[in-house]
Amino acid sequence: MHSLGLVALVVRDYDEAIAFFVGTLGFELIEDTPVPEQGKRWVVVAPPGGEGARLLLARAVGDEQTSRVGNQTGGRVFLFLYTDKFWRDYDAYRAAGVVFVREPCEAPHGTVAVFRDLYGNLWDLVQRR
């Protein structure tokens, strides 16, 4: 049996990323452990109560990684955040200042809207059918 455990999201700064994902989106901070020998931190966040993959917030090092912050997929939707109550989360995120670039619509797979994270990566907020 296999499962997807972590997805690395390249970020500019650990603390600003934690503030957005935990403070704005309501994710849980699962781990924040210094890795002094590498000058890094091991920072993992996840949606509350989620059983799926978690995000490893990976601070960019060097020009190549920095150039990918906010554009890890060339402008395509990158991550899909499932919810059991679309309108509750949509309204809460908008009230918290999250920018939606595509308004809610009904699609064959469920109710969906597209938002930007603090770096510009695109996410689907989805309540599946």
Image (spheres, rainbow, N blue to C red):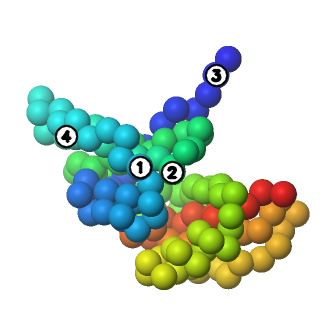
Marks 2 and 1, the one that precedes in the sequence: 1
Apparent side of residue 10 relative to residue 40 in the rendered image (left or right): right
Q: Upstream in the sequence, badge 2 or badge 4?
A: 4
Query: Is 23 placed left or right of 77 in the picture?
Result: left
- Judging depth in this view, the residue of 113 and 27 nearest the camera is 27
From the image, tell me which residue sits under label 4. Answer: 40
Question: Does 94 appear above or below 127?
Answer: below
Q: Please give the name of the residue rendered at 40% of the width and 59% of the height, measured from the top-left corner.
A: 21
Instruction: Write the residue at 68% across / 64% down.
Output: 85
Q: How many marks?
A: 4
Give the structural element (helix, strand or loop) at label 2: loop
Tag 2 residue: 47
CA gap between label 2 and label 4 equals: 23 Å
Sooner in the amino-acid sequence: mark 4 or mark 1: 1
Marks 2 & 1, CB-CB < 8 Å contact: yes
In the drawing, what numbered circle is on residue 124? none
Three-letter code, disc 2: Pro
Q: Where is residue 79 in the image (x, y as percent from the top left)?
A: 58, 55
**Residue 66 visible in the displayed image:** no
Question: Amino acid type of disc 3?
Answer: His
Q: Disc 2 to disc 1, how far (Cα)?
A: 6 Å
Which quarter of the rendered picture does the C terminus lie within?
A: bottom right
Q: Mark 3 — residue?
A: 2
Q: Is mark 4 on a helix, strand or loop?
A: strand
Which label's residue is closer to the chain start, 4 or 3? 3
